[in-house]
Image: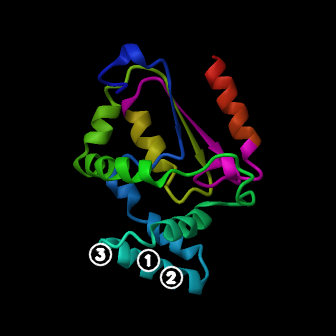
Amino acid sequence: MAAKHPELVRKIILVGSGPFESRYAEGIMKTRLERLSDRERAQARRWLEELEAGNRDGLARFGRLISKADSCDPLPEGEAGVEGRPEVYNGVWPQADALRRRGELLRLAGEIRCPVLAIHGDWDPHPAEGVEKPLAGVIKDFRFLLLKRCGHTPWIEREAKEAFYGILRKELAA
């Protein structure tokens, strides 16, 4: 939208973005699985096989387990103040992944003319360099902030939540 309708977008803030090139995405699931116990890893693999076979029954459980692997020091469930919306993810992800695989995602990012800030956690299994390097090469007004002791979802991280919201408040006020 920002590339096609620049008059509608003043600034973009990416939070916990996935990588913009496929080569950076290859190790994400491996990293996630390594962060789980042996038992959790086996369960995740079973649910992943079911999902790949088209069985969506375990999607929520799989998502909770992956969220654990994606987090550094999460607040107890319910204290984060924001709920996940798997239906949004499922509606967007397949298209975004296809665009990334074809190189279109990065090409479209290069058409963005407004400022872009990417906020990323140092514990996020999505490699920070997979966001920073590609976007820095195609977006003129690009900034990248790496939050310490922070996973994929900064608003649930005990040590990064306040810094994250402080950055958001500052950026939205500017």
Could you say whether the residue bearing mark 1 is in a helix, strand or loop?
helix
Which amino acid type is shown beneath numbered disc 3?
A: Ala
| Distance between the alpha carbons at the discs numbered 2 and 1 | 6 Å
Q: Position of residue 170 (x, y in %)?
A: 68, 24
- Circle 2: element type: helix
In the rendered image, the residue lying farthest to the left is 102
Mark 3–mark 1 distance (CA, rounded to whole Å):
10 Å
Q: Amino acid at mark 1?
A: Trp
- The tag earlier along the polypeptide, 2 or 3, is 2
In this view, the residue farthest toward the front is 57
Could you say which disc has been placed on residue 47 in the image? 1
Q: Residue at x 43, y 66 (%)?
A: 27
**Label 1 Cα neighbours within 10 Å, binned few <14 / some 14-19 / many ≥20:** many
**Residue that mark 3 sits on:** 53
Q: How dense is the environment of label 2, judged by Cα within 10 Å: few (below 14), some, or many (20 and up)?
A: some
The percent coordinates of residue 51 (x first, y second) are 36, 72
User: Disc 2 vs disc 1: Cβ atoms closer than 8 Å?
Assistant: yes
- Residue closest to the eye, 87 or 24: 87
Residue at image x 52%, y 74%? 33
* Residue 140 magenta: yes
Magenta stretch, residue numbers: 138-161
Q: Observer-nearest residue: 166 or 107?
A: 166
Residue 78 higher or lower than 32, as above or below: above
Image quadrant where residue 47 sits: bottom left
Q: Quadrant of residue 174?
A: top right
Q: Tell which of 2 and 114 is nearer to you.
A: 2
**Residue highlighted by disc 2:** 43
For image coordinates 54% across by 47% down, the residue present is: 16
Image position of 116 (left or right of 153): left
Specify whether residue 31 is in view.
no
**Label 2 – label 3 distance at C-alpha:** 15 Å
